Image (cartoon, rainbow, N blue to C red):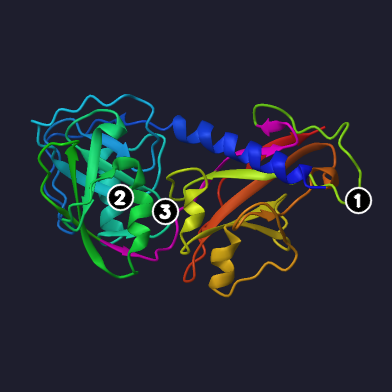
Amino acid sequence: MFEWKRRAIVFGLALVIAVTVGLTIRVCETDTNQSQSPTSSISRATSTPVVLVGSAADSVSPTPEPEVQVTLLGLCRGEYGSVSHEYCLEQFDRDGGRLGLGEPVTIIMDVGGATNEFEFSLDGTNDPRLGHIIDMAITEFAPGTAHTVQIRYRGGPWSDPLEFTVDLLDPLAPIVSSICAEGGCAPVTVLPTAGISNTEDAFYPLVEDVVGVARGGMWEWMDQSYIWVEFMLNSDAGYIGCSNCDAAQAAGVTYPDRLPFGESGIFYNWDLRDLDSGKHDMQARLRNSKYIGPWSAVFEFVVE
């Protein structure tokens, strides 16, 4: 009876591992003659900056350079496959120097290296944290509060602090990256219906993975209570699914047609057996207690 739970959780975890391991530090180019922004304390780079996605996984052995002091050039909310220095600074300016609670954080600095070569400190405390956990670390703060972040090579001197405020913001559009069900994950494969059981108490839920929520460990983003994900299948706005639904319920938003499965905040939204053979599409959006974000681009998958 509970075999479907095991399958769903196994595939969901495997998917998260694949996505997080794929995230790395990314180098981007910027104009070397930019002036300081009038609306933020972030200075414009005079050398090629490095973009550090705050939710990236650590898969490289550390090679710390403790004698080098890191310069923290900027940060912004959002998780991007490729982001320019200027775009991140502009996003931070548009947000009024704020980071969105429950959303990922992109960090820009003047040096490169593997994520786990660095440490962060929040509010000047002697509590170093690896770079990949800053997204979830800031969810410990209350909305509307001001804070600082510093970065260093592990064991090295701290950078100067950079100020930011955390708040509930109108969420950015996420990306649906994969959908898994019963041994298959789109877009790599079609989702198979042949051979699955029609037993009344058997379930074959779609497990959706979304880029654009705060990441740390596996499913760690569901440990925060600020943001959740809504899903829409085949443009049917009358039947909305959710993930991290515990946060939704805490905010007074309920999804009465959804059935909980697995661990905290994971809900059963659609059963593979209920989908007709052929092409389908899925969209996602982020939501908090104040704002509903825009729908993502369509993610197409095939059922056979």
Q: Secondary structure at mark 2?
A: strand
Position of 38 with respect to 200 (left or right) is left
Task: Examine the rendered structure and indicate whether residue 169 appears above or below residue 207.
Answer: below
Q: Earlier in the sequence, mark 2 or mark 1?
A: 2
Q: Secondary structure at mark 3?
A: loop
Q: Which residue is mark 1?
A: 200
Report which residue position mark 2 lands on.
76
Q: Nearer the viewer, mark 3 or mark 1?
A: 1
Q: Amino acid at mark 2?
A: Cys
Dividing the picture into quadrants, the one containing residue 117 is top left
Disc 3 versus disc 1: distance between alpha carbons? 38 Å
Tell me which numbered mark, 3 or 1, is placed earlier along the sequence: 3
The residue pinned by badge 3 equals 103
Closer to the observer: label 2 or label 3?
A: 3
**Would residue 100 be visible to someone looking at this image?**
no
For the record, the magenta segment spans 165-186
The residues tagged by marks 2 and 1 sit, at their Cα atoms, a distance apart of 48 Å
Q: Give x and y (percent) for residue 128.
A: 23, 46
